[in-house]
Image (cartoon, rainbow, N blue to C red):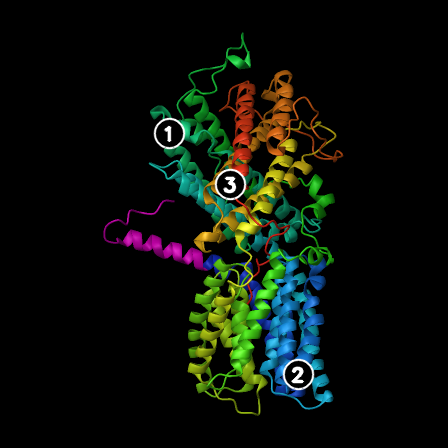
Amino acid sequence: MNPPDTASSPTPASLRYQAQGWLQKSLHVLLSQYVANGLTVSLGLVLIMLAIFEAAGLAAASTAAVGVMITSLPDVPAPRKRKIMQMLPAPLLGAPLFMLVQLVHHDELLLGIVVTAATFLAVMMMAWGKRGGPICFSLLFSTLFSMAAPPVGTLEQIALHGAWFLAGAGLYLLWAVLTTHLLNARFRAQLLAECLHSFAQILRTQARRFGPQPDHSALLASVLQQQATLADHLQNTRDVVLESPTTPGRQRLAALLLSLLEARDHQLACDLDLDFLLEHSASVAALPALQLALDGTAAQLEALGMDLLLSRRGAAISPITDLRPQLAGALPPRTQPADPLAPDPLRIDTTDPLALLHNMADRIGHINDEAVKMAALARGDLAPVLTAVRTQWQLFVSATRWSWKPLLGQLTWSAPTLRYALRCTLAVAAGYGVSLHLPWVAHEYWILLTIVVVMRGNLAQTVQRRNARVAGTLLGCALVMAVLAAHPGARTLFGVVALAMGLAHAFALRRYLYTSIAATVAGLLQAHLLLVGIQPSFAMAERLGDTLLGALIAWLFSYVLPAWERNQIPALVRRSVQAQLKHAQLALALLDDSKTSDLPWRLARREAYNSLSDLTLATQRSLAEPQKVRPPLEPLEALQARSYQLLAQLTAVKSLLLLHRAQLDMAVAQPALAQSARCIAAELAGTDTAGQAIPEAGPPVAGQPFQPRPDPLLAADLTPWLLRRLTLACAMASELRQAQARALAEPAEPTAARNGDDHHPL
């Protein structure tokens, strides 16, 4: 559905449309896995705090709440079987740090040494990437909340505080494992709905390329950004949805996810030849129909995602309309039918605009086919087929073991994680030193807390966090003053802290300003509870001053031992090109109908998408860095565009091989595929491989037999289209190689790994 024209003054129809859009967005957020996860955190925190409060008093409950908080940070939707290993490092490492700070709290020098050493240890957890991010901030918060607690005088008191800390952490571990099992089916549906929503946004952007006077460069950049977002969502979804697909409900969702991946491939290829078609008036007249088909499919996928969020089942889920008849009726008839008496594929003109238009409509039709299939799977009208995934789902999910290899890989001077850890440690040391000499009653833990949540592994995110943190602290302080002015009891404060903690958890990856406000409320009230008996006063001006000072220190130290993106990009470029090479080899390989599956290609395809997304994000982050240290953007943008286009060409080839093999002349296609594989390998590997055999893709994997599906929109013989795609793919590989050479021409400090700063702390 397209919005009504709002260029003039708003009309009742436009206002109603805007209200409906706002309602849909709000409902999408409220029913998401983020909010559900935040609510479980809130409920677990308040139940544990109340239980310990009733059993042992306020001091024990306040200390146990710290254990709950630091254990809850890694509590995100995850596979059931690895939940404990995902969360266990937080309390195991956090409890000793909490007690060690208590032990040296009376000595300013020793306290400073412990805090700075703990900061370095915590930030080095970023070596494990997204898994290590929450553990990093769990350790930092354990240290800083221990600083907020009143000093204790004896070892027995320290041991008692540590025991209550571990009690809260242990109880929350049990709570997290229980809720993960209870909500597993719900999380599967919510994560899948998030992916459907993200993919629908890509389709809408894609549809705009078919509109009048599109800005193709801007739209391509937008699609690349949206593809990066979708890639991140997809990996989280794979980890949960593809875990043990043994029940009918899980199998339906797993099959739905695989169908979404197929639709993404068809989307990638659906704008091939668009620039050529825009130059021909005969084809331009039909493009609005293709745009309408993409927009309509996007709207129906969004509706399907909402059905999943609302837990609708069976007939309550609306089917998705088959748009192939509509597409066929909107296109002009083909003017060059194949001659059955002379079926030479080389005589068919593959540059005929109407023929290209029909092929583009076919690709859009395939997107709609997969959407129809997804709705049928969700309704239960279609049985899921998961031959490969059912027995080999472990190949699709993230690693679960904690090994030393990622850490050892970051113990070099050029490694971004080591530089980030040193930079953050120096900033914390400076902040601690400054806090000891402030003219007002400084809360050094608040200054240090601001530093560690604002400072990121790159300048772009640091600047973003700095602004949101200052604004969030100002608003959070005002809310805390309002709460404390009512002189609430302990139980009320427990509820407010739990609610704020849940909100901070829910919006950490979506709206950091909201997280900053909620985290300020939770942090200040938690500190207030820890200082029970001392009658703490709250001065908003002092807290704001501490926040401004901490944000300033974090920003200034972002320029110390920087890990500029230009130093990380060469490794990302090489990884992306290598992934393209592997994907090309497998995309062009013919499968034996009965003995092999396309599973190796699917895994290579995932790496191609992920590596391109990482490169796209690194390039975007570099825009916030000083001009003199930015990498050359033009070759990087060209490399991303060529990578995207090569993926599109190879996806079109793979679709022909999987869906229309019966319409190919294999006597012509087979040597062409082999020659193209050698050509692309020679270009992307940078070596002369002409005449050599194509590398083996690996041992065959038992899978589903191939089933060709002729399409009425297409010619009887699709061999010329295959040859066209192969020729364009080879040319695109050559351009990609040239873009790679230009991107790597700028001198840069090599590195072997990317930043591990994808997780957002409170």
Instruction: Tell me the CA gap for discs 1 and 2.
Output: 70 Å
According to the picture, the residue beneath numbered tag 2 turns out to be: 102
* Residue 564 in the image, given as x and y percentages of width and height: 53, 55
Q: Mark 1 points at which residue?
A: 278
Q: Which residues lie in the magenta part?
A: 1-26
Q: In this view, does 741 lie to the left or right of 394?
A: left
Q: Magenta includes 339?
A: no
Q: Nearer the viewer, residue 434 or 273?
A: 434
Q: Quadrant of the C terminus?
A: bottom right
Q: In this view, does 455 lie above or below 392?
A: below
Res. 244 mark: none
Viewer-nearest of discs 1 and 3: 3
- Mark 1 and 3 residues: CB-CB less than 8 Å, in contact? no
> Is residue 555 left or right of 235 when viewed as pictured?
left
**Callout 1 crowding tier (Cα within 10 Å): few <14, some 14–19, many ≥20:** some
Residue drawn at x 47%, y 75% as measured from the top left: 549
Residue furthest front in the image: 747
**Local secondary structure at mark 2:** helix
Within 10 angstroms of label 2, few (less than 14), some, or many (20 or more) residues? many
Earlier in the chain: of badge 1 and badge 3, it is 1
Type of amino acid under label 2: Gln
Which residue was labeled with disc 3?
A: 640
Q: In this view, does 755 lie to the left or right of 627?
A: right
Going 67% across and 83% down the picture, which residue do you hit? 104
Residue 585: x %, y % from top left? 65, 31
Residue drawn at the location 39% of the way across and 54% of the way down: 21
| SS for dot 3 | helix
Magenta stretch: includes residue 15: yes
Q: Which residue is drawn at 68% across and 37% down?
A: 600
Q: Which residue lies furthest to the top in this view?
A: 341
> Of the residues shown, which amino acid type is indicated by label 3?
Gln
